[in-house]
Image (tube, helix red, strand yellow):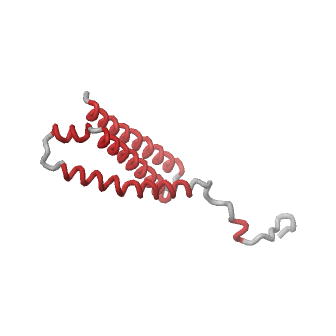
Amino acid sequence: MHRATRSYRSDLARVRGLGSAKEGAREWWMTRLTSAALVPLTVWFVVSIVGLVGADHAAVVAWLGSPVAAGIMILFIVVTFHHTQSGLKVVIEDYVHVEWLKIGAIVLVTFASIVLALAAIIAVLVIAFGD
């Protein structure tokens, strides 16, 4: 080995700072935060829907028409789609090894998540505020 290219650094010192572009920690925290937020939101959703079993259409519309229910439902939608998109992105990054396919799949999942979340939010707003 030529002296100019020889390194006296340890293996650990050579690999420190390499790897992720510092995005992994943020994504990891966002996944944990959305997971934690989904616990009470899902409990609220399930309890609310169980409470509406047997109710007619007008009662369901009246329930979702309340500002609190509509607001929490929109929050539930946003957190659910963000969590889903983030999780699918990690799975794609880990298991799709063809770069163009990986990028295409991530773009498709992100686009679909945004479109579906917006459609759900608009549906809640239409119900809450009427036609």
Say if 43 sits above or below 112 in the image: below
Give the camera-side residue of 105 and 43.
Answer: 43
Left or right position of 70 against 13: left
Quadrant holding the N terminus: bottom right
Q: How many marks?
A: 0
Q: Residue furthest right?
A: 3
Give the camera-side residue of 2 and 11.
Answer: 11
Residue 126, x across and y down, in percent: 28, 32
Left or right position of 35 against 6: left
Quadrant holding the C terminus: top left
Residue 49, x across and y down, in percent: 22, 50
Give the camera-side residue of 3 and 73.
Answer: 73
Q: Which residue is pictured at 27% across the width and 38% down the height?
A: 66
Q: Which residue is pictured at 50% across the width and 59% down the height?
A: 94
Q: Which residue is pictured at 47% across the width and 47% down the height?
A: 106
Residue 91, x across and y down, in percent: 45, 57
Q: Residue furthest top?
A: 131
Residue 127 found in image quarter: top left
Residue 30, x across and y down, in percent: 49, 54
Left or right position of 64 against 109: left
Left or right position of 64 against 112: left
Give the camera-side residue of 48 and 124.
Answer: 48
Q: Which residue is pictured at 66% across the width and 60% down the height?
A: 18
Residue 56 found in image quarter: top left
